[in-house]
Amino acid sequence: MTDKTGADEWETTAGGGLVARGVGTPPTGFGFDLILIDDPIKKREEAESEVYREKLWDWYTDDLYTRLEPGGAIILTLTRWHYDDLAARAIASEPSRWTILRLPAIAEDDDPIGRLPGQALWPARFNESDLQRIRDVQAATGGAYSFESLYQQNPTPREGAFFKVGHLA
């Protein structure tokens, strides 16, 4: 399609349709049976910005969630860049409404797709030794913070769960 508007909004003859909007753009005038949100945080700078995370939450709660039709659903696919990201807030606000599928790059106990602990999620792209190399590089430059969030989908505070940097002598 050459018409940009046509690519962002269309309807089928059977009554279905699609409205595509970027993060922060309100879907004014529409109601939705299904809302798909894909990677609302694109980079570390956005993830670390409390201002950006707050604006994202406001967009979700005020502009997007209010357009969800009764009985509608939201699918949120994302990298867990930060422990206070959109997923964390959405789950905390309505824990019983969400089904969570977390697929870490390196399988842990009770893997949802039946991998053994230590197995790679996509070995043709990143096998176990590739993932260990990436983990080692990230650990040498900033601890487990990046690997745990980007690859394991398990974000923690940068300072760690037990000790704050300012509390160490």
Image (cartoon, rainbow, N blue to C red):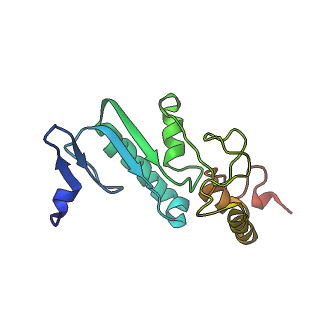
Instruction: Write the residue at 48% across / 40% down.
Output: 90
Q: How many marks?
A: 0
- The image shows residue 83 at horizontal and vertical percentages of 60, 50
From the viewer's perspective, is residue 62 above or below residue 38?
Answer: above
Q: Is residue 158 visible?
A: no
Q: Is residue 26 left or right of residue 90?
A: left
20 sits left or right of 135 in the view: left
Q: Position of residue 102 (x, y in %)?
A: 58, 44
Where residue 42 sits in the image (x, y, percent)? 47, 62
Say left or right for 143 vs 75: right
For the N terminus, give its image quadrant: bottom left
Quarter-of-image position of residue 39: bottom left
Which residue is at 49% across, 62% downward?
46
Q: Is residue 16 visible?
A: yes
Front residue of 12/71: it is 12
The residue most toward the right is 169
Q: Position of residue 43 (x, y in %)?
A: 50, 65
- Quarter of the C terminus within the rendering: bottom right
- Residue 100, by quadrant, is top right
